[in-house]
Structure formats: structure tokens, C-alpha cells
Image (cartoon, helix red, strand yellow):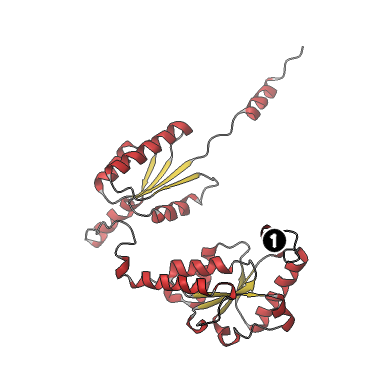
Amino acid sequence: MNEPAPSSLAGASAASAPPAPRHTVFFVSDGTGITAETFGNSILSQFAIKPRHLRRPFIDTPDKAHQVVREINHTADHDGRKPIVFITLVNTEILSIVKEHTQGLVLDMFNTFIEPLEAEFGITSNHRIGRFSDVSESQEYSDRIESINFALAHDDGQSAKNLAESDVILVGVSRSGKTPTSLYLAMQHGVKAANYPLIPEDFERAKLPSTLMPFKAKCFGLTIDPDRLARIRNERRPNSKYASIENCRYEVREGESMMKREGIAWLSSTHKSIEEIATTILRDFRPDRLAY
């Protein structure tokens, strides 16, 4: 009986080998972990990998620190590779526990930047835990809460009340990204963003809804690729006219034509993140929100 060639055996062995485990990334913080995760994800996005993410917030006692160290070390043993550990820890005792006992690649995001800045400024940082301390005293926080309530009240054209107070009014066909962008602007930047859907009746009249006409200068349009729109709508209402590719093409075409006629700036959300869309809107409507 003929034996398989060595190359064939190697190929069969490779094909049957189990897939390598994904990298695991921990975001460890004595606060919410949002800073660690946001910064860490920005760095990780430079690599063509899809690691498993585990956020561990409020690690603010030695006991909690030892618990998370055990979890990280167990993951290292299970995966057979070092977890990546992004940390934003202020307390020196907790920081030492995590740094000295963790079987992972620990990236200390605070001290990487704080120590050089302390040297440059000639002062010691306040070592405050978390970015949300004393929120009751923060006007910025109050403004964000008010903006979130405004965005929720004016979502999807629910209300035309107080539109004069809006910073921006997002217009576009249904499911083009208006709601998540409105909420992001409110939550991250304290911007009062309303959003209003353009519907077939608007296209038949060939003009903006009368409610929006007094505030046209505040309008910003979102559009989307029709194929992408059809896929999104089919998840919501499968096999409906609303989700059909023909209807999606019609609505997108008419929506873009209307925005051009009315002189409304717009962009496509198809290949842009919410952050990119929001930054474009801030640049055009609230450039002060780009300065801190």
C-alpha cells in the first residue's frame, strides 16, 4: 500500500489542528474602565486581530486586585499565551499587586503619561480615581444629561417642541444612523441633537417637512448605500416593501435629491463610524465642542 507523501501528512495535520486561541485583553480600572477600554481599543485597532475583551471596573481594594490577578493568570494558563492588560489604576498598592503578580503584558496607561507630564509641569497630579468624581458639581455633566433627555424626546420626529433649542437636527431616511448619532452627540459632547426621518410623503411633496423649514440652517443629512439599507431593514421587517431593495434605492435617491435642493450638508454613514460622523457634525455646527 502506498504511503502518503510527507507533504500530504503535514497538510492533513495542519488541517486537523485546532484553531489557535484568541488573545484575551483585560481592561482593569479603579473607575468605570471606560478610559482604559477607549484608549486600549484605539491601539488594538491598528492590528488585524479580534481579541476577546474583558472589562474589570472598580478594582479599588487589594482584595479585588488579587481576584482580578487570579482571573488574568488563569486565562494565561488556559490560553497558553499572555493576556494583554490595559490598566488605569491610581492607588499604588493596588497598582503594585496587578503589576507584580500578573502573568500578562501589563500596559500602565496612567503612569506612561502622568510621570512625564508631572516632570514637564513641575507639579504632582491629583491622582483622582475616575473621571466622574463630584458629578453633582459639574455643569458639563448636567448639560450632558439635559442633552440626552432632549435627544430621547426628539428621536425619530416624536416631537417638534423646542426645536429652536437644538444644536443640530439630523435628517435622512429611516435606519440611516440618525438615532445612534444623536445619542452619541448628547452623551459624549452635550450637544442637543434632534432627528427627523424623511418618508415617502415628503418625497411626494418634494420638500422638507414644514416643521423643519424654520430650522433648515440647523439640519444635517445622513444617507446610506441602498444595499446596506436593505440589509438593515430586512433584519427589522423582513420581506416587506419597506425593506425591499427597490424601495431603498428610491428613498435614498429622493432623500439625497431633497438635501441637495434644500442646500443641506450631508454625508453617507455606510462606511463611517458614529465617532467620525459626530466629529464632522461638531466641526460644522459646534466647533467649540472640539476644544476643551
Residue 236 versus residue 31: which sits nearer the camera?
Answer: 236
Q: What x and y, as percent, mark residue 233?
A: 68, 62
Answer with left or right where residue 7 lies relative to residue 119: right
Helix, strand, or loop for circle 1? loop
For the image, the number of numbered tags is 1
Q: What x and y, as percent, mark residue 47?
A: 52, 48
Residue in view at x 43 percent, y 51 percent: 40
Answer with left or right where residue 109 lies relative to residue 15: left
Q: Amino acid at mark 1?
A: Arg
Image quarter hosting the C terminus:
bottom left
The quadrant where residue 123 appears: bottom left
Q: What x and y, as percent, mark residue 280?
A: 53, 71
The quadrant where residue 104 appears: top left
Residue 109 visible, this orientation: yes
From the image, tell me which residue sits under label 1: 237
Residue 80 visible, this orientation: no
Image quarter hosting the N terminus:
top right
Specify few, some or many for label 1: CA neighbours under 10 Å numbering under 14, 14-19, or 20 or more.
few
Q: What x and y, as percent, mark residue 234?
A: 70, 59
| Position above or below: 267 against 89 | below
Residue in view at x 45 percent, y 44 percent: 25
Residue 99 versus residue 166: which sits nearer the camera?
Answer: 166
Answer with left or right where residue 250 lies relative to residue 59: right
Residue in view at x 46 percent, y 34 percent: 81
Residue furthest out toward the top: 1
Residue furthest out toward the left: 123
